[in-house]
Structures are given as structure tokens and as C-alpha cells.
């Protein structure tokens, strides 16, 4: 709600709202290049034309730091709402899709475009109140970027404007007090944290299939064939794009090895790639793809395996 928004932020929103044409929240996103905006009105982030990422910024959670710089604390916990309650399956998927797009911009060294919005109900009720609808949504002409990404803390910092600035620790703590980031859950017992290699691999494969599926690609599981890769990724026309060996890691199982078949395939097949999913099966799962010449850079890679 407007009364929860920092006055400096609200003033900018009001100026943009009054100076532009009257558009619905969906029309704003559509005009930014999201062709399927009407089919995805409740998403938290979108892929637009030109591989541009657009993300919602909830104004109630925007903080203003030194020099008037805006920043936003992004929770990497996809399982829980800001209040700490569990998300529904649909909410979890939307949160994961949003983080995947934000991480994509970070890995590419790019910024993202933002729509800044306020809501009709208190922000704490955003994911629980059926009356929670957008009150005001405006396109932000200033670019945002992911300034830090800390999986261990389940926290990322999004910053508006030029790179090179980060909020101080005191500013971050004050922003946490505003909300938006669920309190860290108590650590699970060691036995519960430990995952078997089989469970870890299954979680990593599931993550990767959903990742490629989200971009309209088909990821066929061929791991049972033991031919040096786990997934064959193809486009809508059936053209093979990648042959991916998937490895999952967690704090309990941080390392991995390649099989003989994977080493052979990496040396002979130009489409072969290594894809490592960190925190596989966890709330902060993320991935990175490596060419054969880059495998030594992958965290946890055992070159002697």
C-alpha cells in the first residue's frame, strides 16, 4: 500500500503515473516487449524481446540508501513468503522462474528493466490475500542490476542505477526490518541435510528440465543410456542444441566427478556441455554451464575423477 512506500520512491511513482498514458498493469508489460504478457499476468518476472529481462519491484520493499540510491533485498528462499509461511506450488514456481531470470542477468553481466508497483492490500498479505491486486504499476526508465548474490545467506541485493555501489551493512539490516526477506529457518539436523548422490542427481535433473522447458526447449532424459551426457536439449523444430551432463552439488556433497563416458563425449562432441546445479533440490538452486575447456572452473569439479 502507498503508506508503506518510502516517500522518495512514492514521489517518483506518482510522477511517472501522472505523466504517462493510462495503461493497465498487463499493457505496461506488453509494451515493454513481453508478447505473452496477457497469458502471464501474475508472473514476478518476464523475458522480453531482445533477451531483456523485466522484473517486478514491489515498492513497499524498496529502501533508499546513501546518496538517494534505491536498493531491494531479494530473497533466494523460494519456499517461503516474506512472512515466513510456506508458499503454494504455483508461488514456488513463479519465485524460481524469477530468480532464474535475475541470475541470468548476473551471469551475463547485464542489467534488467523493472516495473515498480504498489498494491491494494498491505504488502505482508501479498501472497495470501485474494484481494491482493496491483494498485499502481509504472515502468522504471532507470536500469536495475543484481549487485550481489549470496546463496549462503539466501539473499541478493538489487540496485537501481549505475554499478559500483552497495548498501552498507546497517542499511541492509534496516531493509530487512522493512520485510520482504523471510527470517532464516533453523538449520535442519545433519541427517536431514545429507542427500544421497541419487537423490541429488534426480533433483538436479528435474531442475534442469524445468529450466530449459521454461524457455520452450525440450530436454530429453537419456541418462539411462550412459552415452556421456544426461539431457539432449532441442528446440521446437527438433534441432539439437546441447548435450548436457548434469551434476548436482550441496553443502553435504560439494564435489563431483565425470564418468569415462562423459570425458569421452566432452572431447569429441562440440555440443557437449557440463551443467552444475548448486544447492540442488534446495531453496536457492542455481546453475552454470561450462564448455569442456572451462570445466576446471566449475566448483567441486574433481579433475582426477
Image (cartoon, rainbow, N blue to C red):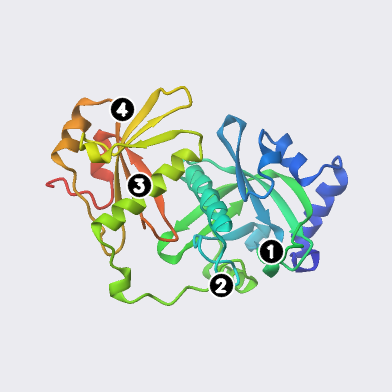
Mark positioned earlier in the residue sequence (3 or 2): 2
Q: Name the residue under label 4.
A: 271
Quadrant position of residue 139: top right
At 43% from the left and 77% from the top, the residue drawn is 186
| In the displayed structure image, the side of residue 17 where residue 185 appears, left or right | left
Q: Name the residue under label 2.
A: 84
Mark positioned earlier in the residue sequence (4 or 3): 3
| In the displayed structure image, the side of residue 168 where residue 9 appears, left or right | right
Q: Name the residue under label 3.
A: 205
* Callout 4 secondary element: loop
The picture places residue 22, in percent across and down from the top left corner, at 86, 42
Q: Name the residue under label 1.
A: 126
Label 3 vs label 2: CA separation?
A: 28 Å
Count all numbered tags in the image, as a single digit: 4
* Callout 1 secondary element: loop
Mark positioned earlier in the residue sequence (4 or 2): 2
Q: Do the residues labelled 3 and 2 touch (CB within 8 Å)?
A: no
The picture places residue 226, in percent across and down from the top left corner, at 20, 38
Mark positioned earlier in the residue sequence (2 or 1): 2
The picture places residue 50, in percent across and down from the top left corner, at 58, 30
Residue 164 seen from this side: no
Amino acid at each position: 500500500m502507498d503508506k508503506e512506500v518510502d516517500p522518495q520512491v512514492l514521489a517518483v511513482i506518482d510522477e511517472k503515473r501522472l505523466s504517462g498514458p493510462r495503461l493497465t498493469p498487463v499493457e505496461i508489460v506488453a509494451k515493454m516487449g513481453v508478447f505473452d504478457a496477457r497469458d502471464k499476468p501474475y508472473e514476478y518476472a518476464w523475458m522480453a524481446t531482445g533477451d531483456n529481462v523485466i522484473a517486478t519491484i514491489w515498492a513497499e520493499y524498496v529502501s533508499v540508501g546513501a546518496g538517494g540510491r534505491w536498493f531491494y533485498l531479494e530473497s533466494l528462499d523460494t519456499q517461503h513468503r516474506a512472512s515466513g509461511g510456506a508458499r503454494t506450488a504455483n508461488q514456488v514456481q513463479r519465485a524460481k522462474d524469477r530468480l532464474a531470470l535475475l541470475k541470468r542477468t548476473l551471469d551475463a553481466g547485464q542489467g534488467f528493466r523493472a516495473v515498480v508497483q504498489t498494491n491494494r492490500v498491505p504488502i505482508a498479505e501479498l501472497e495470501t490475500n485474494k484481494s491482493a491486486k496491483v494498485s499502481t504499476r509504472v515502468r522504471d526508465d532507470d536500469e536495475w542490476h543484481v549487485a550481489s548474490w549470496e546463496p549462503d545467506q539466501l539473499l541478493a541485493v538489487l540496485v537501481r542505477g549505475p554499478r559500483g555501489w552497495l548498501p552498507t551493512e546497517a542499511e541492509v539490516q534496516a531493509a530487512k526490518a522493512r520485510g520482504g526477506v523471510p527470517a532464516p529457518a533453523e538449520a535442519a539436523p545433519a541427517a536431514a541435510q545429507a542427500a544421497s548422490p541419487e537423490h541429488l542427481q534426480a533433483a538436479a535433473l528435474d531442475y534442469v528440465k524445468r529450466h530449459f522447458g521454461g524457455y520452450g526447449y525440450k530436454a530429453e532424459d537419456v541418462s539411462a543410456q550412459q552415452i556421456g551426457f544426461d539431457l539432449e536439449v532441442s528446440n521446437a523444430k527438433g534441432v539439437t542444441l546441447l548435450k548436457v551432463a548434469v551434476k548436482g552439488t550441496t553443502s553435504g556433497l560439494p564435489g563431483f566427478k565425470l564418468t569415462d563416458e562423459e570425458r569421452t563425449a566432452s572431447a569429441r562432441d562440440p555440443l557437449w556441455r557440463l551443467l552444475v546445479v548448486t544447492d540442488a533440490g534446495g531453496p536457492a538452486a542455481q546453475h552454470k554451464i561450462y564448455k569442456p575447456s572451462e570445466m576446471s572452473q566449475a566448483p567441486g569439479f574433481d579433475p582426477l575423477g
